[in-house]
Image (cartoon, rainbow, N blue to C red):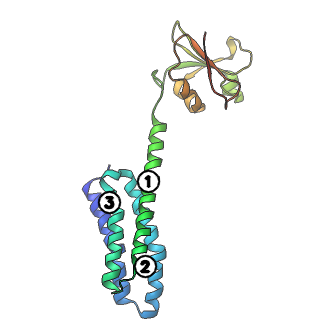
Amino acid sequence: MVNKRAIIIWLAITILVMLALPFAVARLASECSGMALCMMLFLIVNPIYSAILGYRCGKDIKKMWNLPLVSAVAFLAGTWIFFDIHELWFVVYAIVYLAIGWIAMAINKYINSSNKRNDIYPFSDAPNTAVFICSHILDSGEDILFVSHDTDDGAWQFLCDKEHNESDARIVSLKYVLDLDPTISNLNDLPLGYCAQRKSKSDKWVIAKN
């Protein structure tokens, strides 16, 4: 979330980029260098700033969604006032900057939403719950192809498709297994007394009663 100070800072930067820089070019640069500087502003500086501003606004769209619009309007006002040329192309530039800002904002919003979904822990059991896993998975990198949620003690077992004996059993945390293979999150609601099996990591789990 952002506070008012952050919004004020970004507004100040917007005024600097979209108003102060055009003013400086129009009033201080020579005719030859002014044209080159205008092209740099229109084609490089402003698009990059629009993307940066929009991406930052994506962190709190509710409070900052309108800043790319303010930036585009500030650009239009600056060019029309300081260059005294009411060209239609300036409107096109402003629309492009607005589009860049909102697209960058949407990208950031999507990334943040995806990260939040990934951060959600799916199991009702605590992350540090001790579970059984076979040594073939830990030591040899075999895929988890069989999962059991035992009835008597609620224990989880994560096994490959090889033959197992007691010496193959290892104890790790449920979170460790989830980090090792995020696809087991699909079994977060596997009932007690049931197991899940698949032929490969890319296959769907087949649920059955133990």
Cβ atoms at labels 1 and 3 below 8 Å apart: no
Q: Where does the image place residue 34, in percent across and percent down from the top left?
A: 43, 88
Kind of element beneath mark 2: helix
Q: Circle 2: is it few (<14), some (14-19), or many (20+) Cα within 10 Å?
A: few
Of callouts 2 and 3, the N-terminal one: 3
Q: Where does the image place residue 55, in percent across and percent down from the top left?
A: 43, 58
Name the outermost residue toward the top.
152
Residue at image coords 57%, 27%: 184
Name the outermost residue toward the right.
163
Q: Where does the image place residue 9, in percent across and percent down from the top left?
A: 30, 63
Q: On the picture, is 104 further left or further right than 150?
A: left
Of callouts 1 and 3, the N-terminal one: 3
Residue at image coords 29%, 68%: 12
Instruction: Identify whether 117 is placed above or below 5.
Output: above
Q: Amino acid at mark 3?
A: Asn
Q: On the picture, is 69 further left or further right than 155?
A: left
Measure the C-alpha gap from mark 1 to mark 3. Answer: 13 Å
**Given this view, does label 1 or label 2 mark the residue nearer the observer?**
2
Residue position marked by numbered label 2 in the rendering: 89
Frontmost residue, 170 versus 12: 12
Residue position marked by numbered label 1 in the rendering: 106
* Quarter of the image with the C terminus in it: top right
- Label for residue 66? 3
Q: Amino acid at mark 2?
A: Trp
Residue at image coords 32%, 84%: 82
Kind of element beneath mark 3: loop
Q: Where does the image place residue 97, in percent across and percent down from the top left?
A: 42, 68
Kind of element beneath mark 1: helix
